[in-house]
Amino acid sequence: MENVIEIRHLAKHFGDLEVLKDINFTVQKGEVVSVIGSSGSGKSTMLRCMNLLEMPDDGEIYIHGKNILEGDINQHRREVGMVFQSFNLFNNMSVIDNCLIGQTKVLKRKKDEALRIAHQNLKKVGMDAFADKPSTQLSGGQKQRVAIARALCMDCEVMLFDEPTSALDPMMVGEVLDVIKKLADEGLTMVVVTHEMSFALEVSDRVVFMEHGVIVEEGNPNEVLTHPKTESLQKFLSRFTKNQE
């Protein structure tokens, strides 16, 4: 299988705090990788470095063998899309306009083509009926589905999800996870930072567990989540189980 993303010796500091320490990580074409770990373990920072929203202090990040730190950052962000936990929709725009702006401003698509693609992706996430609604009138789950559609409109090769359900009411989590599962079934390459262990177990090809800025365990979801090798992962999963009770 072809590596779409390859990270070598990635490091990131915030002041004196070492957030990522010598991270080595690959993502293959069509793979779904779930990244788990406690708050402060470095999960989101690693994801943001992959999209260059945070610039690494050391290491290399390759997309199809090309070092993105030496290329056009904006071009790279077009190839690697991001869905945030807080949606980041433009509140002064309708649903359809949120899906058009990147296509017309960044990809320079003509309006009719951008509209066709926007409606196509809104249908995919079950939100086309809301195309003309102001984004402020949507529920959290609806906003996140629009955010996913907006990212899909940019024809990204890899999609990064930073805890896409953590800001949602529990009743809305399922509708967003169902959309992500559908994209996985379609073969979209994805890296998902998540606290949804059932999702990680059911949908992922691989699970990565991080703690204190390093990757502690990774592998087959069933092995990692049901037979953790390290005490730190055992403790993390037991805390998680207690929180669900």
Image: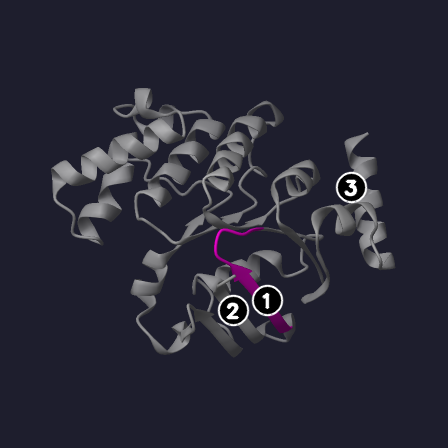
- 245 and 197: which is toward the camera: 197
Is residue 5 shown above or below 32? Answer: below
**Secondary structure of the residue carrying numbered label 1:** strand
Q: Which residue is mark 3?
A: 240
Label at residue 6: 2
**Secondary structure of the residue carrying numbered label 2:** strand
The single residue placed furthest to the front in the displayed view is 1
Counting from the top left corner in percent of width and height, residue 84 is at 47, 46
Query: Which numbered disc, 1 or 2, marks the residue that appears first in the sequence?
Result: 2
Q: Quadrant of the C terminus?
A: top right
Q: CA distance from mark 3 to mark 2?
A: 30 Å
Q: Which residue is mark 1?
A: 25
Residue shown at 50% from the left, 73% from the top: 56
Amino acid type at image mark 1: Phe
The single residue placed furthest to the top in the displayed view is 129
Q: CA distance from mark 1 to mark 3?
A: 25 Å
Kindly check if marks 1 and 2 are in contact, taking CB atoms under 8 A apart as contact.
yes
Query: Which numbered disc, 1 or 3, marks the residue that appears first in the sequence?
Result: 1
Examine the residues drawn in magenta and state their main secondary structure: strand
- On screen, residue 220 versus residue 151, left or right, reads right
Discs 1/3, front:
1
Q: Give the magenta-colored segment's residue range.
A: 22-32
- On screen, residue 11 versus residue 159, left or right, reads right
Amino acid type at image mark 3: Phe
Query: Which numbered disc, 3 or 2, marks the residue that appears first in the sequence?
Result: 2
Q: Quadrant of residue 100?
A: top left
